[in-house]
Image (cartoon, rainbow, N blue to C red):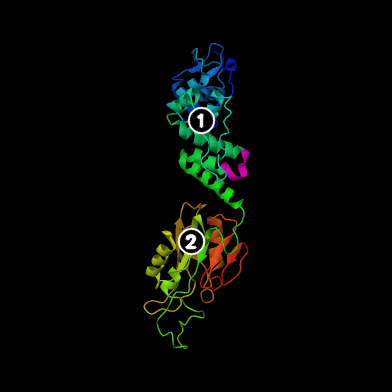
Amino acid sequence: MRVADVIVRERHRKDMGDVAALARSIEDVGLLQPIVVTPDDVLIAGERRLEAFRLLGRDDVSATVVPLEDIVRGEFAENMARKAFTPSEEVAIWRSLAPNVSTPVGRPKKENGGNLPPLEKGKTRDKVASYLGKSGKTLEKQVALVEAAEAEPEKYAQFVADMDRTGRVSGPYKRLVVARKAESIRREAPPLPGRGPYRVIVADPPWPYEVRLADPSHRGTTPYPQMSIEQICALDVGRIAHDDCLLWLWTTNHHMREAFTVLDAWGFEQRTILTWFKDQMGIGKWLRGQTEHVLMAARGRPVVELTNQTTALPAPRRAHSQKPDEFYEFVERLCPATRYAELFQRTSRLNWDGHGDEVAP
């Protein structure tokens, strides 16, 4: 049939690939497989071959006429053995087959940003999912990602780009759910100062040092009252903590073992350790200290917006017990909250409720 007579309607493939290479192959060995059209000359399969013929300036192309009722299904079946559809292209197929679906896909069903509602179940969803070789649940996630990117491209377009680039759906979908939960948390009413409940708590307790405490010339003497491990464990931190709370507990190399005891007493489970690498070394009996650690611990299911944060925090050394500004910026980027709590705070900060050197919060 004449190339000019082929009717190409809306297609679902957006990436045509290297058509020039295909044209060179056709010129060398000929067209090994005809294009496929309906009895009305509407293209079902072979859009890249047709484009290659146009690139070569050919007037005629071999075509097979197939009376397919479902043109989209034919297009998918033909391309399954060739260049795979991207996940967002698969969503376009879903939409063409189910134009009247009214389920609000991509909209959280709970105020706290819970799982997204399912697509309309039944023949259409199940058929499309089976054509794509995946479950209906995975298709729901793809649709949710595409709809989120369409509604707020500045926030979510990258999620769809990552999904199409890797072909993976679960990772970008999880990031979407976390991002929406974080947005919901940031819209919450702020906790009551000193009472909470706080979603994020930082604590830098005055750990006890028994070595030469009575000697004022000792360079390790602390400029604040110290507390025993028993006193620190007795602090009722859980009283001001949200059911889904992240705790950042500062500790030194010397008190690492005791820090885990404190976590147990406060009702938190350790998740990982962030290490502050200082630009200068300090004192030390066995080795000169140049690091401090903060244990990241959790209770419940707190939300973290993990991007490229690592377990290393390089920052300049500060005054005695003063923590770097970079740490607080790190916490605010990673942990969504309306306000943050800091126990034994030394410097007041915007959006942070501090509790000075008090024995109890």
Give the residue pinned by disc 2: 238
Amino acid type of the residue that numbered disc 2 sits on in the rendered structure: Gly
Residue at 48% across, 32% down: 139
| Label 2 crowd (10 A; few <14 / some 14-19 / many >=20) | some
The N terminus lies in quadrant: top right
For label 2, the SS is helix
Number of labelled discs?
Answer: 2
Q: Position of residue 336 (x, y in %)?
A: 56, 54
How far across and how far down the image is residue 151, in percent? 62, 38
Which residue is more in the foreground, 204 or 274? 204
Image: 300 above or below 275? above
Residue that numbered label 1 is attached to: 90
Residue 153 forms part of the magenta stretch = yes
In percent of width and height, residue 57 lies at 57, 22
Nearer to the camera, 67 or 174:
174
Q: Secondary structure at mark 1?
A: helix
Measure how far apart labels 2 and 1 are at the Cα level. 47 Å
Residue 295 part of the magenta-drawn span? no
Tell me the amino acid under the disc marked 1.
Glu
- Decide whether the magenta segment is chiefly helix, strand or loop: helix
Up-down: is 244 above or below 122? below
Q: In the image, what residue occupies the spot 45% across and 60% down?
A: 296
Tell me which segment is drawn in magenta.
151-157
Mark toward the viewer: 2 or 1: 2
